[in-house]
Amino acid sequence: MNKTVKKLIIASSLAATSLLMSHSALADWQSYKTVTLDGYGNLIPGGSAYVEKDVQAGVYRFRIDPTSAGVDYASGQAGNTQSKSAALRVYNRTSTADHTASVNYYGLNNDGIQAAGIIHAFPQGGGFDLFLEDWQRSDDSGSVKVIIEKWQQ
């Protein structure tokens, strides 16, 4: 193999690698929205879930914002902490004639060290609900924020 061919192969390899690296550097999570759940108003039963019905197809990440105040599920009572968790229900649309769809439930939690995220793909779009749950909401207070991001390439 002569020097010209070697140089051409090396130059082509470097150009291809550079192109791939620059393209993958652009792929990342982009902010979709942040939803604040109220410890009383968005708590079921009795309150109402945050509902979004028209999510475009794509891959989304849902996670608790670690800077959230948190929800106290027994305000005024000793020993309670500010809970940073929420429930997530997702609905995947389909284009089948019988309009079948899938529904999934997830728990979002922040353990105080790192906020765990749930990654969910909506192949053909869908919707989601975010809510809190407690059997007695009258003594609940505070809020928790859920960060929602969409994967972009």
Image (cartoon, rainbow, N blue to C red):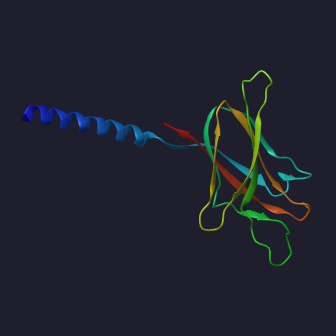
Residue 130 vs residue 34: left or right?
right
In the image as oriented, which residue stretches furthest toward the left?
Answer: 2
Total numbered badges shown on the rendered structure: 0
Which quarter shows the N terminus?
top left
Q: Position of residue 102 (x, y in %)?
A: 76, 37
Taking the view exactly as shown, the residue that stands out farthest to the bottom is: 78
Q: Residue furthest front?
A: 1
Q: Looking at the image, is 74 positioned above or below residue 101?
A: below
Residue 96 position, x and y percent, is: 74, 24
Frontmost residue, 142 versus 116:
116
Q: Name the quadrant containing residue 101.
A: top right
Percent position (x, y) of residue 68? 68, 60
Q: Residue at position x 19%, y 38% from top?
A: 10
Is residue 138 rendered to the left or right of residue 124? Answer: right
**Residue at coordinates 13% horizontally, 36% vertically from top-left?**
6
| 55 relative to 83, above or below | above
Picture coordinates of residue 75 (x, y %)?
Answer: 85, 69
Give residue 14's quadrant in the image.
Answer: top left
